[in-house]
Image (cartoon, rainbow, N blue to C red):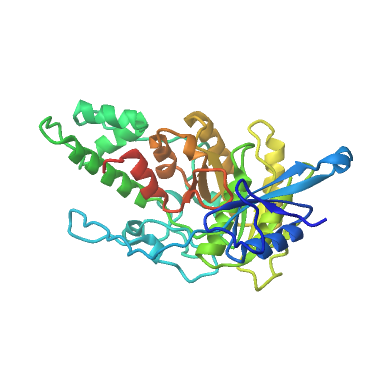
């Protein structure tokens, strides 16, 4: 039986080409069938929006058989637009986009603000100097605290500031610790009530950019695992990152799904990997295998807040397989206390990078600053939707600045 690609509007036929920007639904039995149907009916440029398993109808459904539902989209033609010119700062220097700086290394480039590159060299957590191309994080040689709790050293006498400015910052989600830290800095806006509020907010935004630029920069190792609590969208975040690697950076590699004794439902990830032209495997390849691959990303079982033995088992496995890169995926919808507990576990497991998910449901992004500035992780990605590609931001600091200070 041949799979048919369907959509909510007319069905694709050979006499009528697929419409640009339209989405189509395919019900297939395997990943190979999905790839063939999409390429035949929609062309090579079609991209996958979602993949899920559905129960088959009729007698096959009564026997427990399932099929794959694949939603594919034909991209609309994009007209070239000139790159935006970055505004000059107060010193008269022009800022450049970090997307124009692509490091030529086998490690995956994690975009960071250009100010961060100019202001500091590569360093380990909290100022300890580390080699520029170190793929692993030596927790014993750094000053990472035993428990991650954002701290701020406030002076005994806080500098007065406009009450309306502080109130607006609190309503934007900034914590009391961060506000106190900003006030302790020498360039905190004065207490002049006649000063326009937007000028004070712009100055605070620049202060936050400077603090974020002090976070040590690390490249993402070629062998990296994605970790996170249940329900945070870990696998979806991995798929979004894979899309960016393939379509934006033109890199090739492999994807592995490690299940231990718990099934992850890796069929969707397998289909998506094949649609991207990536190799999918059920175990992590040896470090020396696949010299033609530029990366190997691994999906692992979820972490646990209470079952520490499972976390320790995962930690041992990552060490045994020589996987230096470890990305902690957290949900922006979790409260600050739960985020701190999750980050503490991430530190114990040697996580190096951070992804925030489900931000499309978060009204105030200000609380993210505590974790982008104080945590030992390199901010890597923000996701804002359930699709497997797109709806994400790699320029993390500037994206959070825009949502915290939309008037800036």
Residue 203 in sight: yes
Q: Which residue is most to the front?
A: 15
Which residue sits furthest left? 194
Q: Residue at x 70, y 55 (%)?
A: 271
Left of 396 or right of it: where is 17?
Answer: right
On screen, 64 above or below 293?
A: above
The image shows residue 143, relative to residue 194, as above or below, that is below
Q: Which is more toward the observer, 206 or 156?
A: 206
Q: Residue at x 18, y 53 (%)?
A: 90
Going by the picture, which residue comes out furthest to the bottom?
292
In percent of width and height, residue 270 lies at: 71, 55
User: Which image quarter is the C terminus in?
Assistant: top left
Q: Position of residue 202 (x, y in %)?
A: 23, 43
x, y (%) of residue 111? 44, 58
Q: Which one is nearer the viewer's eye here, 384 or 162?
A: 384
User: Hey, which quadrant is residue 188 in on the image?
Assistant: top left
Query: Which residue is drawn at the image coordinates 60% and 48% (left, top)?
Result: 9
* Horizontal arrangement in the rendering, residue 244 relative to residue 193 (left or right): right
> What is the tally of numbered marks visible in this picture?
0
Query: Is any part of residue 259 visible from this angle?
Result: no
Q: Residue 298 at x, y = what percent?
A: 66, 54
The residue lying toward the viewer, choosing from 277 and 203, is 277
Residue at 68% over, 35% down: 308
Quadrant showing the N terminus:
bottom right
């Amino acid at each position: 039986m041949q799979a048919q690609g369907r959509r909510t509007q007319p069905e694709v036929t050979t006499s009528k080409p697929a419409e640009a920007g339209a989405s189509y639904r395919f019900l297939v039995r395997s990943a190979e069938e999905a790839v063939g149907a999409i390429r035949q009916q929609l062309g090579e440029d079609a991209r996958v929006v979602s993949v899920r398993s559905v129960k088959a109808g009729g007698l096959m459904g009564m026997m427990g058989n399932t099929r794959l539902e694949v939603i594919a989209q034909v991209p609309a033609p994009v007209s070239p637009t000139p790159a935006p010119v970055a505004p000059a700062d107060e010193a008269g220097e022009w800022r450049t986009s970090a997307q124009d700086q692509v490091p030529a290394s086998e490690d995956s480039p994690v975009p960071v603000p250009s100010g961060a590159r100019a202001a500091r060299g590569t360093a380990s957590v909290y100022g300890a100097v580390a080699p520029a191309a170190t793929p692993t994080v030596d927790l014993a040689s750094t000053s990472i605290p035993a428990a991650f709790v954002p701290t701020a050293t406030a002076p005994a006498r806080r500098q007065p500031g406009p009450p309306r400015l502080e109130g607006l910052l609190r309503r934007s989600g900034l914590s009391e610790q961060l506000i106190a830290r900003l006030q302790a800095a020498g360039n905190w806006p004065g207490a002049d009530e006649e000063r326009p509020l937007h000028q004070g907010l712009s100055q605070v935004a620049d202060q936050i950019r400077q603090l974020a630029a002090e976070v040590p920069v690390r490249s993402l190792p070629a062998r990296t695992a994605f970790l996170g609590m249940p329900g945070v969208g870990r696998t979806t975040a991995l798929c979004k990152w894979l899309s960016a690697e393939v379509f934006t950076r033109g890199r090739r590699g492999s994807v592995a799904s490690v299940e231990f004794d718990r099934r992850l439902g890796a069929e969707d990830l397998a289909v998506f990997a094949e649609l991207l032209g990536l190799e999918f495997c059920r175990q992590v390849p040896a470090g020396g295998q696949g010299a033609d691959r530029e990366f190997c990303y691994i999906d692992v079982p979820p972490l646990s807040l209470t079952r520490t033995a499972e976390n320790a088992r995962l930690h041992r496995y990552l060490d045994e397989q020589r996987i230096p890169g470890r990305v902690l995926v957290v949900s922006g919808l979790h409260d600050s206390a739960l985020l701190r507990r999750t980050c503490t576990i991430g530190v114990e497991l040697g996580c190096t990078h951070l992804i925030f998910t489900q931000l499309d449901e978060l009204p105030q992004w200000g609380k993210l600053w505590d974790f982008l500035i104080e945590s030992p992780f390199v901010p890597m990605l923000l996701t804002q939707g359930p699709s497997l590609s797109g709806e994400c931001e790699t320029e993390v600091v500037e994206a959070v600045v825009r949502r915290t200070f939309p008037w800036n």
